[in-house]
Amino acid sequence: MKHLNKLTFGAIALSMLLSSGMNTEAREQISIVGSSTVFPFSASVAEEFGRAYGIRTPVVESTGTGGGLKLFCAGIGLEHPDITNASRRIKSSEFEKCQGNGIDMTEFVIGYDGIVIANANSAPQLNLTLGEIFSAVAAVVPGPKSTDDSCDLISNPNIKWSDIRSSLPAVKIEVLGPPPTSGTRDAFAELAMEGGSKSFKCLGALKITDSSAWKATVHGLREDGGWIDAGENDNLMVSKLDANPDAIGIFGYSFLDQNSDKIKGAIVDDVEPTFENIAAGEYTISRSLFFYVKKAHIGVVPGLKGFAQEFTSEDAYGEEGYLVDKGLIPLPAADRAKYSSAAKNMPKLEM
Amino acid sequence: MTNKKISALTKKRYSSEKRFKAYCIAALALAMAILFTLLSSITLNSLPAFTQTHITTDVYLDKNLLDPNNTNDLEAILREGPWRSLAKSSLREMVPGVNDRKEKRELYGLVSVIAGDSIKYYVKENPNDIGKKVQINIPSSDDIDLLTKGLIDRNLPEENRTVSNLQLKWLDQFIYEKRVSKRFAWKLFNHGDSREAEVAGLKGAIAGTLLTMFVTLIISFPIGVMTAVYLEEIAPKNRMTDFIEVNINNLAAVPSIVFGLLGLAVFIGYFGMPRSAPLVGGIVLALMTLPVIIIATRASLASIPPSIREAAYGVGASQLQVINHHVLPLAIPGILTGTIIGIARAAGETAPLLMIGMMAFIVDTPHKITDKATVMPAQIYMWANNPERSFESLTSAAILILLIILITMNALAIYLRKKYERKW
């Protein structure tokens, strides 16, 4: 059984060899991290870019907006990503951290994403205001004793939609929404919940007197079963809605676009969540999508500038581009021209 | 006690025994039913993904167009040919009268975005056909694929489906002309990931899994076996070895995400190893597999009767000889079983790989352990999150393929055990 002996030692020698020779070698691929909302668009561009230019296809990781910016701002060097995607603008705290590490970046806006409130096609068409959405899912709402200046916050008493407005269907409030880790949740809290809270005057007064209490109140979602943390942009959610006509789901527009045979979007503040309405900025719950390019890596990582140009080409993010087929809502033509030229000059972002 | 009482007691004991048996059978039946439901639903969902709709397209491989300078250099033709526009113009010729920009877009939407590549591939295989009119099978777009499989209801109003009325009309014309066919979806195995469902395959993920498992095996197997041999055969039994043993058992119970955090902090952060690489993934999974191998090897060594060792010592063998010539060869079936099961578990793991960046969109197939790669379970997770409907069945297909690989590995473990196992 001598060969067994040699085999074992051979294996050990090989594993040592493996663990010794691992200096970071020059990277040929663009490395992209960031938002899971931008991920499908970024991946489409990466694939197209790799196919068209015959270079190694960029690698796209879905880390979430915050996680992506953290990795992006960690430093300059090939072990750090070159591009990060974001479903919100970079915060000033993140920007300062980036600057602290000597990182300059160029900002690109690629388009809009609407957040839709959808239910099954077999269910009645919902027509809600932001205030009604707030009343349906907030953990606490101003009670009947509230005055214009001070809120008497009570835990949400609305069990059925018809408790909010009698013409709404008399079914239990059951909203499936994105989990707290998701950028879609942040956007929903900022756009829908904050927007909805404006229909209560006393909450406006609270914002002035105690802004942190206001934020906790406005962003707090009910935990009594009315709001259910479900997946983010999940196909499972679509089938759940399809199976349960009483449930309402909250997700990105591209899922509505792809599943229009099963679900339909609620009309919010008298505006339907259609492509045209979101593009025109009339649909209230919509946000811009971004990506940031690390300036120091341009010229070091091959194709970085080319990738930005591909992303901002009319073939990609224009009105008839392939990203639009994937559910992206394009920017107005003037903005598109601005970012297309930014891809050539790579202006430094100042905040 | 009277006879009557005794017989009543016996009857009670018998019936309680019967009840117990019935409970056990019920538990088994429930477990089987759950397993059956799971497997059959995955299989049923995955079936559409194994076939792919193709549209037979008439293509005129015009020599003046493909090789304007008459170089006859096939490589240059393949590299520079206007494949994409050739695919588009071929479609336009099959459906005359499409001039409107919007209608053209709908027409091109019938076939996959890689239609040009299909033509290019055909020319590569049949270079003599340049200058001829040929029929090439081009994969349809994913929406057309869903429609021909009945997964999109064509009777829905136009705004509720992803295929337009015009596209339906053209598709019906193609079906009438017998141009539409369903073929086995080889792209599942010879294409990498893609955002287009009709192109997306598992080649990259399977290669990534193999590379990762290679690293895992090569690190965890020798270290695991050596550790177990030392602890079981050589080390004295004292507090120190007890302490080590307890810790190895604890290590086996550590949640896998913890190993991912360790990998991120130590291997990527401190040693500067590349992100998203099978190298780091393999090391992290090796740490996770190590305790499994150690425990299995120790159990297997312990089951060898002391008489074997004593007989070897009796004829004058040294400790090295006893271990290498007698104990280890006899323990090998158990060791291999433990290793294969450990590796199979590692192959189905996602959580630690999430931390080290292996959950990524990667099109190119990895060739080295330092290339960027993803693994099958990560690929399944990413596909499950894609909005396009076709990815639903693709996800199930990927799950099915992963399950088949894992079941094969487990079957191999059972086979090895049965074949080499010795009863004492």
Image (tube, coloured by chain):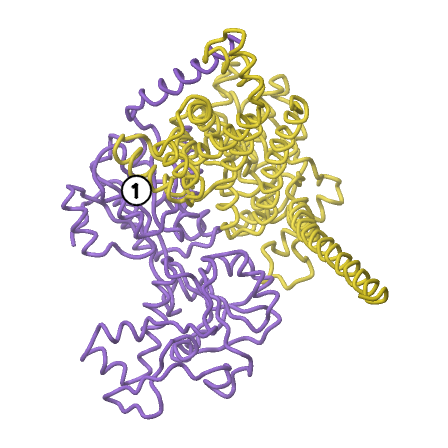
Q: Which of B65 and A182 lies nearest the eye of the viewer?
A: A182
Q: Which of A22 and B114 lies nearest the eye of the viewer?
A: A22
Q: Quadrant of residue B269?
A: top left
Q: The disc numbered 1 marks a residue on which chain? A: A
Q: Is residue A55 visible?
A: no
The image shows residue B124 at horizontal and vertical percentages of 57, 21
Q: Identify by letter the chain in purple.
A: A
**Which image quarter is the C terminus of chain B in?**
top right
Q: Secondary structure at mark 1?
A: strand
Q: Which of B64 and B247 lies nearest the eye of the viewer?
A: B247
Q: Is residue A121 visible?
A: yes
Residue A242 is left or right of residue A221, and the answer is right
Residue under the image location 39 percent in, 46 percent down:
A62
Q: Is residue A262 above or below residue B268?
A: below
Q: Which of B281 and B243 lies nearest the eye of the viewer?
A: B243
The image shows residue B384 at horizontal and vertical percentages of 52, 49
Specify the colour of chain B.
Answer: yellow
Residue under the image location 32 percent in, 93 percent down:
A145
Q: Circle 1 sits on which residue?
A: A83
Q: For mark 1, does the 10 Å Cα neighbourhood hold few (<14), some (14 to 19), or many (20 or more) residues?
A: many
**Which image quarter is the N terminus of chain B in?**
bottom right
Q: Is residue A225 above or below residue A12?
A: below
Residue under the image location 69 percent in, 36 percent down:
B183
Q: Is residue B295 above or below residue B177?
A: above
Residue A100 is left or right of residue B339, and the answer is left
The image shows residue A251 at horizontal and vertical percentages of 45, 62
The image shows residue A305 at horizontal and vertical percentages of 29, 37
Number of numbered discs overlaid on the protein picture:
1
Residue under the image location 31 percent in, 20 percent down:
A20
Q: Residue furthest right?
A: B3
Name the residue type under label 1. Ile
